[in-house]
Amino acid sequence: MQILPHIENEYAPLHTVVVGVARNMGGVPDVESCYDARSRSSVLEGTYPSEEDCMSEVKGLIEALESLDVEVLRPSGIPSLNQVFARDIAFVIEDQFILPNVIEDRAEEAHAITEIEGRIPSSNIIMMPSGCFAEGGDVLVHNHHVFVGVSDEATFDAYKTARTNYAGLEYLADEFPAKEFKGFELLKSDVDPQGGSLHLDCAFQPVGCGAIIAPHLFKHQEDVAWLEKFFGKEHIYYCSPEEAYGLTTNVFSVSATQIIVADVFEGLTSWLTEKGMKVTPVKYNEIVKMGGLLRCSTMPLNRG
C-alpha cells in the first residue's frame, strides 16, 4: 500500500510511524567502535544493555503506540547491526521523505528502509546531495519553523557526535523556502555523555503544551533566550543536568494532548499532567544507555 508522507510538527495526530529494531544488534561494541559518548560510557562501565532487554523495551513501545491506534512499520533486519534508532536515517518535512547523508558508521542502516521507501511516490522523496549531512534527531518541524541542531565546520570535523553541518541546513532551507529554518549549535563531546548533546532532540523538543529544554547543553545561551521568548517561559519544562542525562527531552508525542514518556520521568510527567496532557509511560531505561530514547527510536511518516 502506498505511503504518503506528511509532517508539519512534532505533535499532530500520528497515523504512521517506523519503529526501530533491536533484534540481532551485534552484541556489545568495542570502545573504539562507539560513535556516541553514552554508548562508550556504558561499554566502559559494563552496563551496555542486552539485546533481550532492548527487544522487550521496543516491544513495549510498539504496544503503547498500537493501543493508541497508530500504524507501526518496521525496518528490515540487518544481521549484527544496531537499528534501534530509526529516527536519524530519514525524516519527513511537509510531504517530502528526506534521505540524508549520515556518518559512515550508520550508513548501512538506510538499507533497512528500502521496502518502506519503495511505497513512497518518487515525487515525495528527496536525496540530499554529497557533502550535505543531517540526521533526523537534529531536525524538529514546528509548523512554519524547522529547528535544526547544527555544527560549524571545525566542530563537525572534530567530533563523531556532530552529525548535521551547515551545508545540510542550508540545503534543507533552500528545498523548503516557505519554512523558516533556525539553527542551534550544541555542546559536543565524544567521551563525556554529560558534556554535550548528540542531537537537538536530546536537548530540546516542542510538545503540544509547550517545550522541554535542557539549557546547559546549548553552546550559545542566546539561543535558549530565543526559545524562551518563542514558547514563553511558563510553557517550558526545564531539565536539570541529571534529567538531561536521562534524555528527558526525548519523549514522543502521539497528538497535541497525548504523549509517551519513559516511566522514570516523574517530574516531567507531573508537569505534563498539570498542563492537561495524557501521559503514557513505558519502560525504556536500558535503551537510554545507548544514547537515545523514544523520539530517537521512531520515524513518523504521517501526522495530521
Image (cartoon, rainbow, N blue to C red):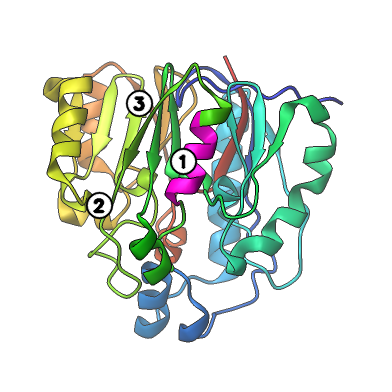
Measured along the vertical axis of the image, is residue 195 above or below residue 9? Answer: below
Alpha carbon distance from label 3 to label 2: 16 Å
The amino acid type found where label 1 is placed reads Leu
Measured along the vertical axis of the image, is residue 64 above or below residue 189? Answer: above
The amino acid type found where label 3 is placed reads Val
Report the front residue among 184 and 111.
Answer: 184
Mark found first going from the N terminus, 2 or 1: 1
Mark found first going from the N terminus, 1 or 3: 1
Side (left or right) of 58 relative to 224: right
- The mark lying in front, picked from 1 and 3, is 1
The amino acid type found where label 2 is placed reads Ala
Magenta residues, start to end? 165-173
Measured along the vertical axis of the image, is residue 262 above or below residue 76? Answer: above
Tag 2's secondary structure? helix
Residue 226 placed where, x, y %? 18, 29
Q: Residues within 10 Å of mark 2 (few under 14, many from 20)?
A: many
Whether pointer 1 and pointer 3 mark residues with C-beta atoms closer than 8 Å, the reply is no
**Which residue in the structure is indicated by mark 2?**
244
**Which residue in the structure is indicated by mark 1?**
169
Residue 85 seen in the figure: yes
Tag 1's secondary structure? helix
Label placed on residue 101: none
**Which residue in the structure is indicated by mark 3?**
207
Tag 3's secondary structure? strand
